[in-house]
Amino acid sequence: MSGLESVRAAQRAAGTLPAPQRSSAQPRDPMSIQQVRMLVPRPLLTRPAGVTKPKPSPKAAAVKPKTTPAVTAPKAVALEKTTPTRRSRTPRQRSNTEPSTGANQADDDKKHKRAAPSKNTPSKESDLRWREIEDYSPPLSSLDGSSRLKATWGPGTAPLDISDEQDAECLGPVEMRVAATLRLKPVQYLANKRRIFAAKVNSLKDGKTFTKTAAQNECNIDVNKASALWTAFDGAGWFERTWFEKYLPDWRKARDR
């Protein structure tokens, strides 16, 4: 037993650390202390005296909102279905001259249909002063009694008797037939004839082509009759340039040649 106790005493002595001895090391300077603190893990550092960590403020208890009792909507009262009454349309009033039957398209076509040319165009006050209009028309002697100057009008339309009209004596026999066929009085024929040839001279001075539309714009008669006059004069050769050379400026003659 004594041997066993001595062995255990030796084991205890071997596992016991030696008693601490007083160190002869010099105290550390402030710089070394700061460096050591930087190397030591943060949880091992002691907090400086007098510094306390602020405690978090306690969370406010969540206030439960008051629940208001749900208001139940009143039940909708079933309305009785009613069939809407259809308004009756008042029929459109028609004039006495408007036909009571026929499709709308036919009515529209009738409204936009161009009116037929008048058979007898009334003379204007300016036509009575036809002598005041400058006369550029070719001479009647250029016809030589031929029937080149002629006009046509609507089929079945009888010529107008103008033998007793004012200034009828100023028309030759061929022109008398043209005016009567177009149902133009002598003053109307003479005035619009001069207007057409004055416009022809102006178109030559401007270097433009004299068309039927240009003649219609110068006349004060029905456009169809003005077009028939243009056709009659053109068929007689009265729109050829040789008839108007003397009315053109010298620079125009030289340039065109």
Image (tube, rainbow, N blue to C red):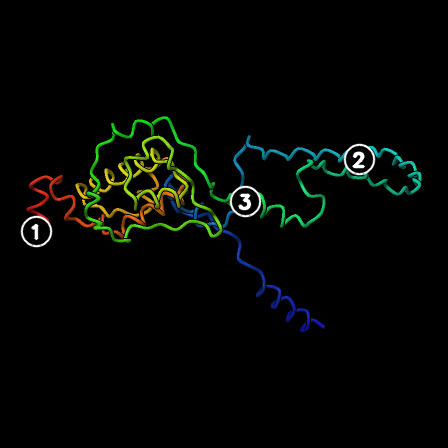
Q: CA distance from mark 3 to mark 1?
A: 49 Å
The tag earlier along the polypeptide, 3 or 1, is 3
Residue at 54% in and 33% down: 49
> What is the number of callouts on the image?
3
Q: CA distance from mark 2 to mark 1?
A: 110 Å
Residue at 54% in and 44% down: 112
Mark 2 and mark 1 in contact? Answer it, CB < 8 Å: no
Q: Amino acid at mark 1?
A: Arg
Q: Nearer the viewer, residue 38 or 93?
A: 93
Name the disc covering residue 121, or none.
none
Which x, y percent locates residue 240? 19, 50
Residue that numbered label 2 is attached to: 64
Residue that numbered label 3 is attached to: 112
Name the disc covering residue 257, or none.
1
Q: Secondary structure at mark 2?
A: loop
Residue at 27% in and 51% down: 234
Question: Left or right: where does residue 205 sit relative to residue 14?
Answer: left
Which x, y percent locates residue 148? 27, 53
Question: Left or right: where does residue 242 sit relative to residue 180?
Answer: left
Q: CA distance from mark 3 to mark 2?
A: 82 Å
Instruction: Name the image quarter holding the N terminus.
Output: bottom right
**Which mark is nearer the camera, 2 or 1?**
1
Q: Amino acid at mark 2?
A: Lys
Q: Amino acid at mark 3?
A: His
Q: Secondary structure at mark 1?
A: loop
